[in-house]
Amino acid sequence: MNILVINAGSSSLKYQLINMNGEIVLAKGNCERIGIGGKFTHKTHDGRVLSKEVEMQDHTAAFAVVKNALLSGEGKVINDLSEVAAIGHRIVQGGYKYDRSVLVTQQVIDDIDDLAELAPLHNKAHVQGINAATAAFGKEVPQVVVFDTAFHQTMPPKAYMFGVPYEYYEKYKIRRYGFHGTSHRYVSARCLELIGNPEGKDTRIISCHLGNGSSIAALKDGKVIDTTMGLTPLDGFMMGTRSGGIDPSVVSFIMDKEGFNPKEMDDVLNKKSGMLGISGVSSDDRDIAQAIEDGNQRAKLAWDMRTYEIIKYIGGYIAALGGIDAIIFTAGIGENQSFLRQEILESLGYRGVKVDMDKNNVRGQEAEITTPDSTVRGFVIPTNEELVIARDTMNIISGN
Ligand code: AMP
């Protein structure tokens, strides 16, 4: 059975066609610059690569390009549309309504659209993606949605409420939702397997998804009790271009001084802050690391600020969990940046955490990176959100 996994952004459409028999990625690719030109890349499992400029006016046009590439020409991997059993979509915001993946119905589409208020850039694009998939593949092909927020729905109110007047929660459902849930779900399940306790009973795990966007989740008995991202993916600690949590009065102060409207201020916090804002160099960790080597003091400050914030969150979560058994590192930075992992683990030296320097030298591969006598087990576990989406989609259409 082949499942097409879709991640539709406002001007992009990423996809993977996964053969669930062996979980092999038959083809994957990306439509970029939708509506403003168009660039298409497509790679097959046997190493064929397409990369071309193609005009794509909207998501429907992008889906037509993807469909053509899968079915014909140099990038062909299937003979007939009927070989796509179902389509699974990544959805950023599922609000309080969705604590699991579901089959797409008109009601589900309307809900995702309504929730766009809480994730304006993402949810609108996801609805376009679902509608475009229907146009390209027909109503007969079932579609499933997998929410980034769903795995965090086990948080108790004391963790997800913000200390603002309760009426805003009642009126607007303002609360912490958390994101990267699909990734935290995948790596934490794998971690529980690795520690020989797949049910997660009596376990305390901290999962660090460190990428361009980053979040940490605290899991007790395999379930999230707290996470760093909030109403939107802006909360938490410094990311590539996002500020993370700051004193809220900084926002009104800067707006007042600079004459910014809410949208302009939102842009500053989401696109011009974080590692980029502090370093003035780049949002990309590789550039930051290079700049530090070249002696750039602001790049070093950005790095140190982020490490410090992460260490504070982990300390807080250890207190909230009443201890810690394992810590996971995943995503672009978590999987590749050994020095950051070392700094974080060494900060837990007071608890008897011991890094295995050789094993920590790993990049993008699963590894246990603490010594056998370490009191906490540290793991690098490469994330695979697409696979979770494909598995959920298969299970739902199979009635499991
Ligand atoms: P993601 O959002 O998970 O794709 O992660 C993107 C981030 O991972 C960027 O800041 C990259 O600089 C960082 N990254 C990716 N590969 C490496 C690598 N080999 N070494 C260090 N950082 C990396």
Image: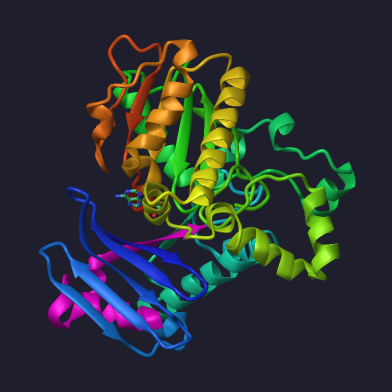
Question: Quick check: 122 left or right of 61?
Answer: right
Question: In which image quadrant can residue 209 be found?
Answer: top left
Question: Quick check: 313 left or right of 288?
Answer: right
Q: Is residue 400 visible?
A: no
Question: In which image quadrant can residue 241 be found?
Answer: bottom right
In what quadrant of the picture does the N terminus appear? Answer: bottom left
Q: Residue 20: x, y in percent?
A: 23, 52
Q: Is residue 95 visible?
A: yes
**Magenta residue span:** 62-91
Q: Looking at the image, is 390 positioned above or below residue 225?
A: below
Residue that protrudes farthest toward the left in the picture: 46
Which residue is at a point 37% across and 76% down the rendered structure image? 31
Q: Looking at the image, is 33 positioned above or below residue 153?
A: below
Magenta stretch contains residue 244: no
Q: Looking at the image, is 263 positioned above or below residue 324?
A: below
Work out whether residue 388 or residue 57 is closer to the camera in this orientation and state it: 57
Which residue is at a point 77% across and 40% down the rendered structure image? 162
Magenta stretch contains residue 84: yes
Question: Quick check: 203 left or right of 114?
Answer: left
Q: Residue 24: x, y in percent?
A: 19, 53
Q: Looking at the image, is 114 positioned above or below residue 155?
A: below
In what quadrant of the picture does the C terminus appear? Answer: top left
Work out whether residue 105 or residue 15 is closer to the camera in this orientation and state it: 15
Which residue is at a point 43% across and 82% down the rendered structure image? 60
| Number of marks present in the image shown | 0
Q: How are the colours assigned in the image?
A: rainbow
Which residue is at a point 53% across and 52% down the rendered structure image? 275
Q: Residue 262: x, y in percent?
A: 77, 67
Q: Residue 138: x, y in percent?
A: 39, 77
